[in-house]
DNA sequence: CCTATCATGTAATCCGTTACATGATTAT
DNA sequence: ATAATCATGTAACGGATTACATGATAGG
């Protein structure tokens, strides 16, 4: 009944949110992620449909489809799902993030640092502003994890702004 | 004859290197990338085989297979390939890098900041050391782009080290 | 009421990874 | 010579993106 599955980061995101909110439709998940992890880990909404289905098939999610009306699919963690999540959470990754920055790639292959620096610095400033805004709205009863992730984002954005500004100001 | 393709970042990497070195086998490309862009943008060697084939089919690369012996495939840019690369290079991305950091994701979903911080800080320190080493070996006639990309990597690693150290030292 | 936008889902395609496989070289 | 490792390549699979499509809701 439960076919084996390997947990991709996307899987963890789905499991993680279902753990937080108890039950959700793929569309709900899309909303949650867009406002949170979506800042540093995006995907198309379609993926949330396929991913939930995949995890359900693997026995990690329970699926209940509305009998009438929109016939939405509601998902929640099974015991196996909760366990898989806990294990994933417990094993700290040594894996490093890859920068995978298109801008840096362009720079690497000879794009003009100044024009690139200009647009990148500006884009990152906007992102930083967004983060700071989110942090300001934060309330005492918020989860700790998301806040910490936000701090990371802020730190990295600041580094990138410094870098791209240097590029923008560099001599010809 | 030249079927259309869309240029993924991987494509740009292949085109970019072929532009630098003139001609290469997929295996050569693997070597080049591993020591350079590979630091912030990795892929399996198999992908360089499929990607070169794909680009050749699209008319962006010329493919010459050795007639005898190992029958290696040698690739070089066609005029169309060179042009595609130039255009890619000329249009500065406004697209932002996504962090896509597994560690941050774990943090987000409630992993223990201290244990995670420990291993992550250490891993990033190693990476930074590697970068600094590379920078030290740099010679006057090196390309500019790769150096600048390296600077970016250094800046970001430093930010991440600061962040993860804070996590490691945080109270329970 | 009609249109635009939001909500919800499926299907097809494509890129990237994993797995497999074999031909050369080097080291012992 | 033989084993081990490097070099080179293909095939299969799976996950992610793109495209498509339709049902609801809200704004005019």
Image: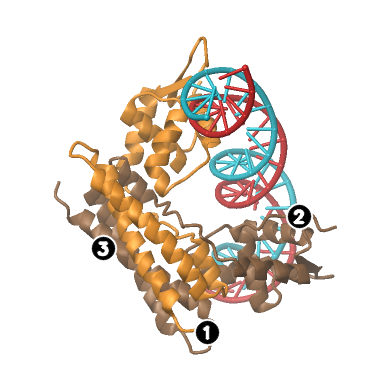
Chain colours: A orange, B brown, C red, D cyan
Q: Does label 3 lie on the same chain as label 2?
A: yes
Tell which tag, 1 or 2, sits nearer the viewer: 2
User: What residue sits 21% from the left and 40% below the top?
Assistant: A139
Please indicate whether residue A48 sits to the left or right of residue B130 in the image. right
Chain hosting mark 3 = B
Whether residues under marks 2 and 3 lie with C-beta atoms below 8 angstroms apart, the answer is: no
Label 2 element class = loop
**Which mark, residue B98?**
none
Tell me the residue that label 3 is attached to: B162
Of marks 1 and 3, which one's residue comes earlier in the chain?
1
What distance separates the C-alpha of mark 1 from that of mark 2?
Answer: 34 Å
Label 3 element class = helix
User: What residue sits 35% from the left and 70% below the top?
Assistant: A162
Chain hosting mark 2 = B
- Image mark count: 3
What distance separates the C-alpha of mark 2 from that of mark 3?
Answer: 45 Å
Residue A81: horizontal and vertical position, in percent?
39, 28
Q: Quadrant of residue B59?
A: bottom right
Q: Nearer the viewer, residue A53 or B88?
A: B88
Residue B31: horizontal and vertical position, in percent?
58, 70
* B105 lies above or below B97: above
Please indicate whether residue B17 sits to the left or right of residue B135 in the image. right
Task: Please rate how many residues cluster around mark 1, counting C-alpha atoms within 10 Å: few if below 14, some from 14 to 19, many from 20.
Answer: few
Tell me the residue that label 2 is attached to: B4
Label 1 element class = loop
Tell me the residue that label 1 is attached to: B142
């Amino acid at each position: 009944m439960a076919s084996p599955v390997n947990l991709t980061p996307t899987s963890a995101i789905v499991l993680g949110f279902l753990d937080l909110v108890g039950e959700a439709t793929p569309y709900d998940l899309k909303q949650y992620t867009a406002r949170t992890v979506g800042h540093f880990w995006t995907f198309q909404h379609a993926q949330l449909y396929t991913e939930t289905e995949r995890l359900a098939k693997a026995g990690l999610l329970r699926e209940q489809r509305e009998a009438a009306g929109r016939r939405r699919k509601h998902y929640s963690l099974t015991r196996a799902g909760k366990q898989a999540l806990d294990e994933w959470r417990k094993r700290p990754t040594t894996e490093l993030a890859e920068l995978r920055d298109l801008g840096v790639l362009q720079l690497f292959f000879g794009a003009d640092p100044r024009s690139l620096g200009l647009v990148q610095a500006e884009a990152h400033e906007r992102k930083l502003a967004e983060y700071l805004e989110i942090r300001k709205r934060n309330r005492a009863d918020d989860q700790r994890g998301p806040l910490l992730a936000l701090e990371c984002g802020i730190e990295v954005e600041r580094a990138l702004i410094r870098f791209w500004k240097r590029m923008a100001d560099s001599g010809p």
